[in-house]
Amino acid sequence: MSAVLQQTNTGLDVDRIRRDFPILTQPVRGGRPLVYLDNAATTQKPRQVIDRIVRYYTEENANVHRGVHYLSETATDSYEKARTTVKRFINARDEKEIVFTRGTTEGINLVAQSWGRKNVGAGDEIVITAIEHHSNIVPWQMLCEEKGARLRIAPVNDSGEVMLDEFEKLLTNRTKIVSFGHASNALGTINPIRKMIALAHAAGAITLIDGAQGVPHLHVDVRDLDCDFYAFSAHKVYGPTGTGVLYGKESILDAMPPWQGGGDMILSVSFEKTTYNALPYKFEAGTPNIEGVIGLAAALDYVSSIGIDAIAAHEQDLLHYATKGLLEIDGLRIIGTAAEKASVISFVLEGVHPHDIGTILDEQGIAVRTGHHCAQPLMLRFNVPATGRASFAMYNTRDEADALIAGLHKVIEVFR
Amino acid sequence: MSDLRELYQQVILDHNKNPRNFHELPNATKAVDGYNPLCGDHYKIYVEVDGDTIKDIGFTGNGCAISKASASVMSSSLKGKSTAEAHQLFDVFHKLVTGEPGSLSTAELGRLAAFSGVSEFPARVKCATLAWHTLNSALEGDKETVSTE
């Protein structure tokens, strides 16, 4: 790798950003520089997040919402300030609309199990799209099976874009909820979610956005989008694993029954009757992932300090630069060529299975994901058993895109 | 890169490109599906067993170079062998790819020795053993589908 990093022309000081991520300087596989291009699986964490978690355990650790003592007050204060940080970050109306979860998957399951079991019945329909992650398929299948409801799938075209006319046709007075990704983890496709939300509302359905790949790359304003639910994970946006957020409109959350029972979600308990706590605590049973939530707030503060628009511009530059370079490789085909894409490139190489590509790139210090990306129906749609996937984050560089391309030439050399 | 050359030895690359016995068996006495759900590898292994003898083996499906070459080498190594010999060879092969001390020399291993590099890549052991596990089930006759998970 050259000493002077090639800068993108987007004004982002990538050199400085990279210094915030200690793991990026760690050599791998016998001293090779790490080229981390598996950001759609999880992002690396900046020192600001790591230090914040250390400070929490060093100075603030206690259980939240309980004690009258100093530490408990401090921990509760940090935990609730994090809720305000999240609220501002996605422009929710009120802290009550921010429920902390274990991640996107738990957020979707919460809605399916609480809202869904109450509001979806036999003969009703749930609409998703053909490019969903398993976590936005299986919870709805489980609900449909239990209730005798039907799961309808909006198809995608050969570029991996949802066919809006077909999507619209699926929306009827039987449609109860429409759930789709902000951006596809497997293809990168950015869905026109504002329009899709409006179409679903026009049919009288409510909407859930799987924002796992949205929040890291795109400006999210839940009020402007007018979505009813928006779920995302901390670890995909430079925060810790095991923590996520479910945003829900207050009126809808309020009418929903609790999902899990336990401590923190109650006002009073007797063996005769339990009174549930107010929002958002009704949905936060048990001691939460306090360090995770505080780490998430630090991650969102970090992203805000750099600016999501500047990050997006940098990632788009990398996307286009890498796409152009990859397409020059003989026999390489990109799966997912939507006009609007997040910085995710799924590809197949003629005559070489993605698993072998992954091993040979790894040996050169390059981390990509290979496999079905938890989207098996999508792999079937494009008639590939698996793909290789390179996904870029704010700290990646054009040099790293070049390393990926050189790495793929090495793959071809091994298999020639 | 030396480890990579160890993993992707010429025998493996050759069997991946030109897999042997890569077809269904019309007279199969048993056919079993083998899956690796983590990477999507899927093979169907066909065997024709006469008494104790494996008269013929074929396979179809697809997956990575390691898994395909392994199915190919396995099929050509076991044709005409007894089922007891097949079990014994599976044991030897398993030790080879997991890096356990084996009981055979490189010469005795023959083409199977091409998989000696796999032990340096723990993530790939399942690729190398998928066809063998599937065949094992076909010979024992207890399952229609095998999964690595």
Image (cartoon, coloured by chain):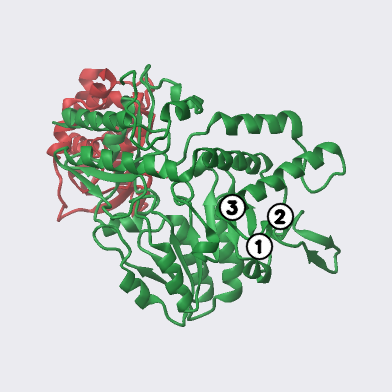
Chain colours: A green, B red
Q: Is residue B102 above or below residue A131?
A: above
Left or right: A191, with B53 as reference point: right
Q: How busy is the neighbourhood of tag 2: few (under 14 within 10 Å), some, or many (20 plus)?
A: some
State whether residue A82 appears in this view.
yes
The chain carrying label 2 is: A
Q: Secondary structure at mark 3?
A: strand
Q: Quadrant of residue A234?
A: top right
Give percent across and percent down for residue B93. Answer: 30, 29
The chain carrying label 1 is: A
Q: Amino acid at mark 3?
A: Val
Q: Secondary structure at mark 2?
A: loop
Residue at the image position 24 percent from the left and 47 percent from the top: A334
Q: For the N terminus of chain A, which image quadrant?
A: top left
Q: For the C terminus of chain A, which image quadrant?
A: top left
Foreground: disc 3 or disc 2: 3
Task: Report which residue position mark 2 lands on.
Answer: A285
Task: Report which residue position mark 1 lands on.
Answer: A259
Q: Amino acid at mark 1?
A: Trp
Left or right: A225, with A254 as reference point: left
Q: Looking at the image, do the residues carrying marks 2 and 1 touch, with CB atoms under 8 Å apart?
A: yes
Left or right: A312, with B139 as reference point: right
Task: Report which residue position mark 3 lands on.
Answer: A245
State whether residue B45 appears in this view.
no
The chain carrying label 3 is: A
Q: CA distance from mark 1 to mark 3?
A: 15 Å
Residue at the image position 66 percent from the left and 50 percent from the top: A84
Which is more N-terminal, label 3 or label 1? 3
Q: How busy is the neighbourhood of tag 3: few (under 14 within 10 Å), some, or many (20 plus)?
A: many
Which is more N-terminal, label 2 or label 3? 3
Which is more N-terminal, label 1 or label 2? 1
